[in-house]
Image (cartoon, rainbow, N blue to C red):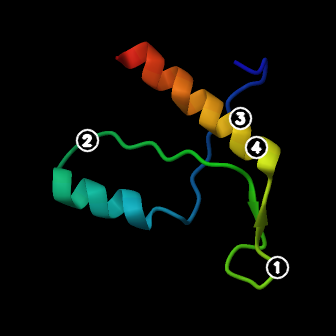
Amino acid sequence: MYNEDIKVEAIHAGLETGILREKLGEIDIVSIGSNIYDVHTPDEHFSISSTVRTIEFLAEVLRQIR
């Protein structure tokens, strides 16, 4: 959608997806999100433009699978 390669990486932030997989069984789970900085500190903030792109991407995925 944005003429950029998708960046795939494993990060230490899988608590919620781990709980879902535990409850639902062997399923594929993907977590996406905007760019967040200084997480869990008083300076935590996020990129609004990245959030807009994430919402647009998710909306397009949902359009294509319905």
Q: Residue at x 82, y 79 (%)?
A: 43
Residue 33 at x, y percent in the picture: 61, 48
Which residue type carries mark 4?
A: Ser
Query: Mark 4 touching mark 3, by CB under 8 A?
Result: yes
Query: Mark 2 touching mark 4, by CB under 8 A?
Result: no
Secondary element type, mark 3: helix
Which residue type carries mark 2?
A: Ile
Residue identified by numbered label 3: 53
Q: CA distance from mark 2 to mark 4?
A: 27 Å
Tag 3: Cα neighbours inside 10 Å, few (<14), some, or many (≥20)?
some
15 with respect to 4 (left or right): left
Give the image quarter of residue 44.
bottom right
**Lower position in the chain sequence, tag 2 or tag 4:** 2
Q: CA distance from mark 1 to mark 3?
A: 23 Å
Residue identified by numbered label 2: 27
Q: CA distance from mark 2 to mark 3?
A: 26 Å
Between circles 2 and 4, the one closer to the viewer is: 4
Can residue 7 be seen here? The reply is no
Tag 2: Cα neighbours inside 10 Å, few (<14), some, or many (≥20)?
few
65 with respect to 4 (left or right): left
Query: Mark 2 touching mark 3, by CB under 8 A?
Result: no
- Closest to the observer, 50 or 10: 50
* Residue 50 tag number: 4
Between circles 2 and 3, the one closer to the viewer is: 3
**Lower position in the chain sequence, tag 1 or tag 3:** 1
- Closest to the observer, 37 or 6: 37
27 with respect to 32 (left or right): left
Residue 35 at x, y percent in the picture: 74, 53
**Lower position in the chain sequence, tag 4 or tag 1:** 1
* Residue 43 tag number: 1
Which residue type carries mark 1?
A: Asp
Q: Quadrant of the N terminus?
A: top right
